[in-house]
Amino acid sequence: MFNKRTRIKDLLSSSTTGQETIVMGWVRTFRNNQFIALNDGSTNNNLQVVAELGLLDEATLKRITTGASLKVTGTVVPSLGKGQTVELKATTIEVLGDSDAEKYPLQPKKHSLEFLREIAHLRFRTNTFGAVFRIRHALAFAVHKFFNEKGFVYLHTPIITSSDAEGAGEMFRVTTLPFDNPPRKEDGSIDFSEDFFGKSTNLTVSGQLEGELGAMAFSEIYTFGPTFRAENSNTTRHLAEFWMIEPEMAFYDIEDNMNLAEEFIQYLIKYVMEHNADDLAFLDQRLAEEEKQKPQNERQEFGLLEKLKFVVDNQFERITYTEAIQILLDSPHYKKKKFKFDVKWGIDMQSEHERYLVEKHFKKPVIVTGYPAAIKAFYMRLNDGCEPGKETVAAMDILAPGIGEIVGGSQREERLEKLEARMKDMHIPAEEMSWYLDTRRYGTVPHAGFGLGFERMVQFVTGMTNIRDVIAFARTPKNCEF
Amino acid sequence: MFNKRTRIKDLLSSSTTGQETIVMGWVRTFRNNQFIALNDGSTNNNLQVVAELGLLDEATLKRITTGASLKVTGTVVPSLGKGQTVELKATTIEVLGDSDAEKYPLQPKKHSLEFLREIAHLRFRTNTFGAVFRIRHALAFAVHKFFNEKGFVYLHTPIITSSDAEGAGEMFRVTTLPFDNPPRKEDGSIDFSEDFFGKSTNLTVSGQLEGELGAMAFSEIYTFGPTFRAENSNTTRHLAEFWMIEPEMAFYDIEDNMNLAEEFIQYLIKYVMEHNADDLAFLDQRLAEEEKQKPQNERQEFGLLEKLKFVVDNQFERITYTEAIQILLDSPHYKKKKFKFDVKWGIDMQSEHERYLVEKHFKKPVIVTGYPAAIKAFYMRLNDGCEPGKETVAAMDILAPGIGEIVGGSQREERLEKLEARMKDMHIPAEEMSWYLDTRRYGTVPHAGFGLGFERMVQFVTGMTNIRDVIAFARTPKNCEF
């Protein structure tokens, strides 16, 4: 019944005129009691609705305010305004919902991102967040399209888990036990056998280990779901709840893994460039204006569109960790003691080191491989023939300009004895991981995988500098609104 | 380097022969020291690999056991076996990973679903679960494809929430507070301001309320994410963690909502019928065999494929709740007192009532609308012109044969005063929901939406009768393995 409207995106992209049509949307601006800029969220571009003088009575004219919702019937006519080919000459305008101009928080002016974060339930109605979340949608769809075309199976790995072996970070407890008077065992400790799942459970930090179980049957799988970190990090780069994509592939070594990750990232960017040109153009302009406010030496080298085009057109640089450390040691930056943290073989590179490599030295995305075993997870494959004390693993991190680590992955240790030895060294209880070890007991194969932080990818493509601005409702320490 | 293999699905679906190729996969069976059935998870069909006598030494022959992983190089040749056009004549066979035939839990025989649930980490390697999870993948992809084509924006609504107004069920607490000696306020109650988010938080039961915020900007959005119920239901129909799809559309009334839901379900089924014909054929056969074990009067009327075709080809029945009650009251079943629960206007229909309507009376999916307001949620739109005491809301449930409720939805109450009155009646604190009410304060529009339980949809399409068999790793009371 209502669903006979034409989406504004479709209307604006067609060049036929003369037809009667119905549009519905929200008023962005109303000028001269005649020109309504109407938006329905299908595109950043507003439809100009022309209400000729005399069409509306005084009372209705007053109700057409920023934020009000309208149903407009009219005739599509060629537009004389610039930036649009058609507009709508209204025959009837019905106000579906009013918006008190005095109280509506979104005035037709520029609001700060900080302010908009406080009204995250309304910020989708702004140009910036409209563009960001349409791009987020396009990226999510492109993720599924990419893997579906390659025959990967999408696996929903569990969100609630009793396993905490991955060690990727602090975890949130999931429980139905009461804090007042929880059940206790004879020794006084909490009796989690009384909890909902009969044991202590947490929110997952990664679906990788379960993903490996899928890869050992379907060869190639991917996950795309929420993951969690209970870390008290109040930064522009961290969320307590974020979405991650984790492909896991049997019969892949570290090279295959890097090739897939690079192809994947380039595919995602290309997809958005093709499908969201208007949104990207808007964000490109937005970023350019933001950059102009900065002192010359802090400005980014590339504009947003330039950067994306560059990443799509150029291969990522591939270097070993050992080479990366050498580059840092040889850098003028190091010699002038400009790094805050020490540089030597064996360190877990800090953000400042990674940024130096991608932003100053290579000026493009860099894949670093062969990290010291000591700083990496137990499931990463030990490289053969390492010098004693300089053991490395077949890990890879992809570092992106402006973002830092965007992908972390590795070839997995498929050799049972080596995996067991590593787990023992790292005090990971093998009994609890028996299901995981079964994949190495029965038909083990070389395999690899990686994780892409989805929000960081959205940041990279949209140019938004605060991660809270690329997820609908951010969860961060002391903040769980909406 | 490894990634030069041909996927078995691609190999079997091509008819060219004579080319050299590499395949990798897991041994399903090995007959006569010559014929290996190899599976790589890309399809339910095994590739027949022929190892001519003399190709392999005695030691290697012994290592080719069920579950072992192989890399095979060979020539594609026409096959004489039935059900396949090509096979692979091996030139080299390398055992990548052994599988101790004595210990490997998956023997080449039929295992019970109960047993396979206990080894859920290996069950993906069986024909049944291979088919189920490839279909689950296809359904998930079809969900995204359907909405993307219609211009809906995919919104990731939050998993951790401080809102508990939806009242859809019992919730899990998410916390980082210690059970031993949690912080307390002066009055002795737990001080959740010290918790990670500065307040008491839970796992979401639905993304709908946040979804509505998105629809008020993008017009049409959908969510597809995990949702949770901390209910102690140990049934074949309930999970503590499951995935739900929740579209939410501005400018839709209840009719538009029903039309969309019906089109959506038919689209999903058609997609799987087109893309997973082999998997469906296997499951059709499997179900037919299972049915044969049952007494005649318990058997289902339709086979799996018949049922799916019927649902795609026929419109869903649409009746009001009032009509549904009348049908039940008029039924021979009721007259013979065969219903366990009472039937009268006002009841929340039980599973037995819903099953009677779809399985006995209409024998097809049924959409029931106009439920009593008293048994439905606060956000559902009150129908105009109801008899006092017989108020109904513009709700709709879709009931499917063999599954019961598969979709629940409604037109939402867009009128601020009516919504506030309803919330007051139902003791829902308006202060905490101020962000939700803002959508009715500023440019409110008629809108509607529904939720589809993804696992129930997978059950419907695969014919699996226990919901634990259509999710990778089920979370149920006292069960959180893997």
Image (spheres, coloured by chain):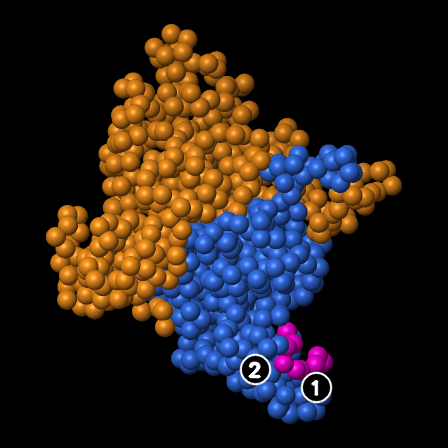
Chain colours: A blue, B orange
Count of residue discs? 2
Q: In what element is the residue under mark 1?
A: loop
- Left or right of A120? Residue A87 is left
Furthest residue toward right: B186
Q: Is A206 placed left or right of A138 in the picture?
A: right
Crowd around label 1: few <14 · some 14–19 · many ≥20 (10 Å) = few
Q: On what subunit does the disc labeled 2 rest?
A: A
Q: Which mark is residue A34?
A: none
User: Which label belongs to residue A322?
Assistant: 2
Image location (x, y in percent) of residue A309: 43, 78
Which residues are the magenta region? A338-348
Query: Which of the marked residues, 2 or 1, is nearer the chain's N terminus?
Result: 2
Q: Residue B258: in sight, yes or no?
A: no
What amino acid type should be assigned to the residue bearing mark 1? Lys
Label placed on residue A338: 1
Question: What percent of the width, then of the height, locates residue A6?
Answer: 36, 52
Q: Quadrant of the N terminus of chain B?
A: bottom left
Amino acid carrying label 2: it is Thr
Residue drawn where x is 58% and y is 53% of the image: A430
| Viewer-closest of B18 and A23 | B18
